[in-house]
Amino acid sequence: MTKAQTPRWGWALTGSGHFFTESLDLVRSLGHVDLFVSKAADEVVRMYKQKLDLPKTVRIYRDTTASAAPVGMFYHGVYHTLVVAPATSNTVAKCVYGVSDNLATNVFAQAGKCRVPAIVFACDTAPELETMAPEGMVKVYPRRIDLENTERLKTFEATTVVESLADLRAAITQRAVELQRHG
């Protein structure tokens, strides 16, 4: 297996609007990122009238192949970290149960199989939340199963589950520091 010259951040976008624009701002701040955009995330980009106007160091991969072909790069040391943010309850459930049937869940599975640390910003983390919808803020009430799946994901090896934007920023900063120390 050959290692990449400069390992990159992998970042999977799912179909959640929860801190979606803020997640894109974080992608912009990181530099060398491969952005994996699920079909649902593509819909959210349009619904939230976002543009994927990202730095030239960001490569975008869309969910266009049945086998999620871009995941092969995990086998070649291209990524030092995978971030899944924001992560819908659907994505979290699929990750917990080992279902990898779209680009986001497939990169999560491959990251785990290749021992690439993952940071997951789960959307459904409390019995009552406020989140941004295309028309403005709304209240949501995650189901018990959604909360249980978030807790289950926290037990996965090499996986950090964060519950707020501040926690996401802190986890990314901590990972960057780790990389500098060992790089």
Image (tube, rainbow, N blue to C red):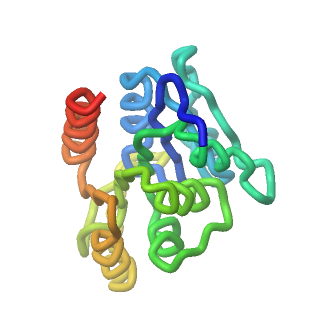
Estimate the x, y position of residue 104 in percent, counting from the top left: 57, 55
Q: Nearer the viewer, residue 72 or 141?
A: 72
Estimate the x, y position of residue 114 in percent, counting from the top left: 50, 55
Q: Residue furthest front?
A: 1
Instruction: Answer with left or right where residue 21 lies relative to residue 3.
Output: left
The picture quadrant where one finds residue 29 is top left
The answer to whether residue 111 is above or below residue 151 is above
Identified at 43% across, 23% down, the residue is 28
Point out the image quarter for the N terminus: top right
The answer to whether residue 99 is above or below residue 59 is below
Instruction: Answer with left or right where residue 138 lies relative to residue 13.
Output: left
Estimate the x, y position of residue 133 in percent, counting from the top left: 45, 51
Instruction: Answer with left or right where residue 105 lies relative to residue 144.
Output: right
Point out the image quarter for the C terminus: top left
Q: Residue furthest right?
A: 65
Instruction: Answer with left or right where residue 133 lies relative to residue 151.
Output: right
Estimate the x, y position of residue 32 in percent, counting from the top left: 47, 24
Report the number of numbered marks: 0
Identified at 22% across, 36% down, the residue is 178
The picture quadrant where one finds residue 35 is top right
